[in-house]
Amino acid sequence: MARHELCRLDDIADGGSAGFEVARTLVLAVRKGTAVYAYVNSCPHVGTPLDMWPGRFLTRDGSHILCATHGALFRIEDGHCVAGPCVGRGLTPIDVAVQDDVVKISL
Ligand code: FES
């Protein structure tokens, strides 16, 4: 496992999301204040990326991560699927650290 610099904290809007490719892994990240949650951008249902538009991963109200393919909803804080065809399963979490406004992940 290696530590990678993902972005600066301000590169993700507060309450928003962003997508990245790091070491050939698609990564989705969601920011809430100074906290960042990151997951592998692959739906546990069929394995497709979740975003319909690059970097857009959240429901309209910003409360959940949304899979654009069949509409599964995932909790932002732990990636657990709470609605849709893969309910009870979850996104693959990625370890995140924010240091001096730099977001780093371990892959
Ligand atoms: S691929 Fe995500 S809900 Fe079907």
Image: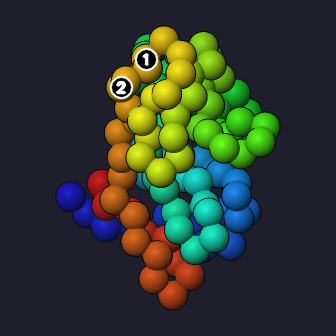
| Res. 79 in view | yes
Left or right, 70 with respect to 36, comes to right
The residue tagged 2 is: 89
- Please state which of residues 87 and 49 is positioned toward the viewer in this rendering: 87
Disc 1 secondary structure class: loop
How busy is the neighbourhood of tag 1: few (under 14 within 10 Å), some, or many (20 plus)?
A: some
Q: Are marks 1 and 2 in contact (CB under 8 Å)?
A: yes
Left or right, 12 with respect to 49, comes to right
The residue tagged 1 is: 86
- Please state which of residues 40 and 36 is positioned toward the viewer in this rendering: 36
The residue most toward the left is 1
Kind of residue sitting beneath label 2: Arg
Seen in the picture, residue 43 relative to 41 is either above or below; the reply is above
* Residue 62 on image: x %, y %: 71, 45
At horizontal 34% and vertical 59% (from top left) the residue drawn is: 95
Distance of mark 1 from mark 2, alpha carbons?
Answer: 6 Å
Q: Is mark 1 within 8 Å of ligand 1?
A: yes
* Residue 77 on image: x %, y %: 47, 51
At horizontal 35% and vertical 39% (from top left) the residue drawn is: 92
Seen in the picture, residue 73 relative to 40 is either above or below; the reply is above
